[in-house]
Each structure stands twice: as structure tokens, then as C-alpha cells.
Amino acid sequence: MSKCGRSLPAPAARAAKRQFVAEAVKDNLIGVHALVWCGGWSKEEILKAANGSREAGFDLIEIPVFQPEVMDAGLTKAILSDNGLKASASLGLSLDADISSDDSDCVSRGKQKLISALNFTQRAGGTVLCGPIYSAIAKYPGPPTAQGRKNCVLALREVAQRASDVGVTLGLEVINRYETNVLNTASQAMEFLADLNASGVTVHLDTYHMNIEENSMEQAVRTCASALGYVHVGESHRGYLGTGSVDFQGLFHTLAAVEYDGPITFESFSSSVVSPDLSNNLCVWRNLWQESSDLAVHARKYIDAAWTAAKLTNVHK
Ligand code: MN
């Protein structure tokens, strides 16, 4: 009871807290990666992804933009709008178009790829372009060279300026050592952002990768809390949430504690839905699930329960 003796009776106070939490949970866009639904981006595939995402209760679809030149941004925007969905976009580069390369032609090709992806994102109505946009998704034979890292910073600074001009935020996804040699930890991402010195660039964390590289979910989130702009939730095997070894409780409780208000997007891959460009890069060799809808509905409920529990715990502190 407060000093003036006019605090709400306990049931009313609990109801008020629950209302607060319900509102707070609504503040975060909850997204789903398009590869849960489809491997390409034809009209039929966009419709399938949009319908499925809406029916499962998601707010946002993350679109992999590996081939921005053949993807229809206008159609994407129209279909997502019809379904009340927002868009984000993501990609990783390839070894022949890699801004962390020593080779200036290779860097130029990577920069051009990022500009194309950025243009698609903006025309499709997206406000975030994320993923490992600073290197190829590949197992590198050694650490980045000093020249390669410098090329990466300079190229991204230019892309960041362009992104800022068109109102798109960039997210640098921290991924594991077998898929990049540039950013494997939240701490490295913060150092990189300091070198980049550009506005509109955030850190993008992913539980699948954090589970491999970080000391804990809590430490990683707290390390980059001031710059955290996007979060992927994925299991240790990239299948159904809650059936692997990822510490989702640690993740959500820390996100609540630092009052993270950005998108939280479910990412999962199975050989039952295959994108030729992405699946091989991500080593998707086996079936983790068969039914997109069942997986997506389960993920949406799992995120809601975990996030609500974390917010409630935070309110009670
Ligand atoms: Mn990810």
C-alpha cells in the first residue's frame, strides 16, 4: 500500500499490471521469416506467406532478398498491406560479392547487391534491412584481413547513408564462426558500430547463433542493448521453439529488463521448404518440420507466452 493509503485493491492492481503487460507486448512487432512458408517469391508464394502469417497472428514478414532484381516490390507491398502485415528484409552476401573482401571489384559487387536489396526493401514498404549484410555467408579459411575489414566499414558507411536517406534501418546480424569471420559476438558488433560511426545502423541478434558463440543470452543482450534493433528467435536445431537447447527464458527476461521494443522474428528452416539460394548456404540438410502452419502457430504462441511471462516478471521487480 502506498503512503497515502489510496493504492488499488490487490485484484485491481493485478488487472492493471496485466493490462500494462498486454499493451507492452503489443509494442513489439512479432515477425516470421518467409522461409517458414515458401522458398521463392512468386505471386502465389507471397499470397501463401501473407495468408499464413496473418492467420498465425504475426505482425510482420521477413523477406529474404537474395534476388532483389527479380522480386516484385510493388506486388509485395500490396499483398502485405491487404493482410495488415509489415515487412522487413534480410540477406547475406556471397563470396563473389563480398564487402569484407580484399578485392575492390568484389567489394563493389557486394555494395551494389546491398543497394539493390535496399531499394527493394524501401519499395516493398519495409523499414528494416538486416542479416549478415557485412560479409558472405560462408565458412572462411581465416580471419578477415585488415584491408578486408576496412573495406567492409567503408562500404557499409556508404550503404548506411543511402539507407538513412530512404528511411530504412540497417541491422547487422551477429552469426556464428562457421558462417562469417567478421561478427560472431555482440561485443564485436559494438566495436564494429563504433568504427562505422554511422546513424541508422543497429545490432541484430539471433538466438541460434548466440547459443553457439555467447557466454549467455543475458550477457549478449546487455552488451548491445543500447544498439539492439532486431532479434531472431530460432532453436538450436532451427526447428520447433522450445524443443532444443536455447535459453529462451534468459533471452526474453533480459529483453524485458532492457525494455527492448524492436521486432522479434521467428526463424526456422526445414528441407520441406527449400530456397536454392539460401538453404545450401545455411546447411539445411534435413526435415525439422513438415507443416508450415503448425510450426508458425506454435511459434507465435510460444513467443507470446515467453514474452508475457518475462514482462510480468519485470513489472513485479
Ligand atoms: Mn538469423
Image: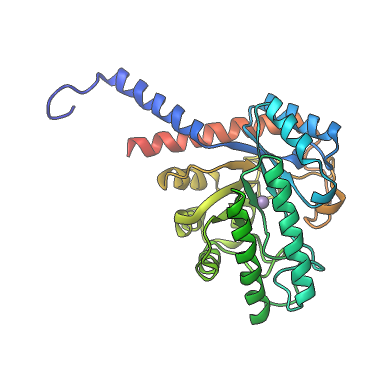
243 w.r.t. 202: above or below: above
In front of the other: 121 or 10: 121
Q: Residue furthest bottom?
A: 146
The colour scheme applied to this rendered structure is rainbow
Where is residue 317 drawn, in percent x and y?
32, 40
Q: In which quadrant of the rendered view does residue 104 lie?
A: bottom right
The total of numbered circles placed on residues is 0
Where is residue 44 drawn, in percent x and y?
85, 31
In front of the other: 57 or 170: 170
Where is residue 244 drawn, in percent x and y?
65, 46
Q: Can I make out residue 267 in this image?
A: no
- In the image, what residue occupies the spot 51% across and 53% down? 228
Left or right of 315 in this view: 247: right
In front of the other: 261 or 106: 106
Q: Residue furthest front?
A: 165
124 w.r.t. 92: above or below: above
Q: Can I make out residue 253 in this image?
A: yes
203 w.r.t. 183: above or below: above
Where is residue 176 drawn, in percent x and y?
66, 62
Tell me the quarter of the image containing the N terminus. top left
